[in-house]
Image (cartoon, helix red, strand yellow):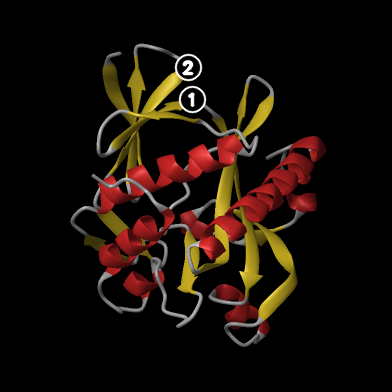
Amino acid sequence: MQIGKELYTGKAKSVFATDDPERYVMRYRDDTSAFDGGKKASLARKGAVNNKFNAFIMGKLAEAGILSHFERLLSDTESLVKRLDMIPVECVVRNIAAGSLCRRLGVTEGTELNPPTFEFFLKNDALHDPMINDSHILAFNWASAAEIARMRELTFAVNTVLKKLFLDAGILLVDYKLEFGRYHGEVLLGDEFSPDGCRLWDAKTGEKLDKDRFRQDLGNVIEAYEEVARRLGVDLS
């Protein structure tokens, strides 16, 4: 397989064409950012940790029948993925109140949400990823009613699998975001699942083990990611 030109450069990943029009290479970089790119840094080992972490999670989801664009690891920092027609919305599930939910609604951080909440956000950094609903998605033709239902269904299915997976490792899955895309008429999970896109707290101490360590200047960001990986059994070698 030949890696071709760079097609996209995001805040932490780059996407490259291959000699197979149905496949891309996703390269995880050491770059990290927060607040819609307002805060940036390069953290050693981050690209490799997130690449291998994501591969592990996507494998667990595949075992549960939740399909994604991920195919296989190519190197420490690269993965082979299916080419998806990405849907420009983010799906967010919250099991525990934190972050923007607390700011918007005045909810105390750490409040358990039963049932978990589900929210859509438009994927647009320039607009600060505004919250949207089904009506917006349909009106602007971002996705069909069937696709909306499928994204919601899959997002909650992910929650069922991962909430237990993390809890068994002594970690609370506080919240997370997912992105989806179309592949030959089917909605598949895209992008990544890593501590960059979720909140993870130690179940006993409440210590934050995710990108909030970067957002809040808590330090030891990658060390926390590696600790989560170690508890889950992710091979980072």
Residue beneath label 2, please? Answer: 22
Vertical position of residue 107 compared to residue 222: above or below: below
Nearest to the observer: residue 156 or residue 23:
156
Q: Viewed as shown, does residue 188 lie left or right of 49?
A: right
Vertical position of residue 125 compared to residue 235: above or below: below
Residue depicted at x 34% and y 66%: 38
Q: Position of residue 120 (x, y in %)?
A: 67, 56
Residue depicted at x 21% and y 58%: 42
* Element on which disc 1 rests: strand
Name the image quarter holding residue 208: bottom left
Q: Viewed as shown, does residue 235 lie left or right of 92?
A: left
Nearest to the observer: residue 33 or residue 136:
33
Residue beneath label 1, please? Answer: 82
Q: Is residue 128 visible?
A: no
Q: Position of residue 97 (x, y in %)?
A: 62, 77
Q: Quadrant of the N terminus?
A: top left
Residue type pointed to by label 2: Glu
Q: Viewed as shown, does residue 226 lie left or right of 96?
A: left
